[in-house]
Amino acid sequence: MSNGHVESSSISGSKRKSPDQCILLGQDAQSRAKVEELKKELHKEASLALRTCGWSEEVYAFMRSKKLEAQSDFQASDVNAMKKLLIADAKPMFISRIPEALKSSLIKRLTSFSQGTSPSST
């Protein structure tokens, strides 16, 4: 330690709570309920942000066009296989297009939640 700062190389991961202290990993009913509530809030926040910036519509249009192209290659019984293939094709393309501001906001919310603080939604 120098000047009040802990060097990360000397104490790897010491800033993290142990699993039994982290609410995100808690198995008790109260922790699980809080985590489920957080998941719902984050889902709403992310969904709204992705619709607002047009990302959701881009994904929908891409998937619709690919589905129409692929339908002739798949039989009715292969619907799940077709869905998996379409998702595998779209995932690398669209995950990289998720706005950085949204990613940052979600990370901040998760960090605050896991540390026991509860910032208001942004």
Image (tube, rainbow, N blue to C red):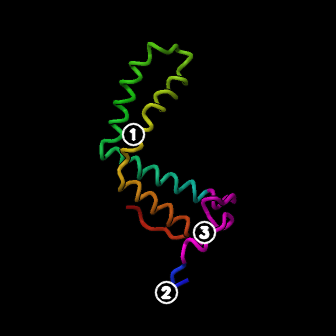
Front-lying residue, 28 or 68: 68
Q: Reading the chain from its start, which is encountered first: label 1 or label 2?
A: 2
Q: Earlier in the sequence, mark 3 or mark 2?
A: 2
Query: Residue 79 at x, y = what percent?
Result: 52, 21
Kind of residue at disc 2: Asn
- Crowding around mark 1 (Cα neighbors within 10 Å: few <14, some 14 to 19, many 20+) is some
Q: Amino acid at mark 1?
A: Phe
Q: Callout 2: helix, strand or loop?
A: loop
Disc 3 to disc 1, how far (Cα)?
33 Å
* Discs 1/2, front: 2
Q: Cα distance, mark 3 to mark 2?
A: 19 Å
The magenta-colored residue range is: 7-32
Which picture quadrant has residue 78? top right
From the viewer's perspective, is 98 left or right of 20?
Answer: left
Mark 3 nearby-residue class (10 Å; few <14, some 14–19, many ≥20): few
Amino acid type of the residue that numbered disc 3 sits on in the rendered structure: Ser
Q: Give how far across and how far down residue 85 sits, in percent.
A: 49, 27
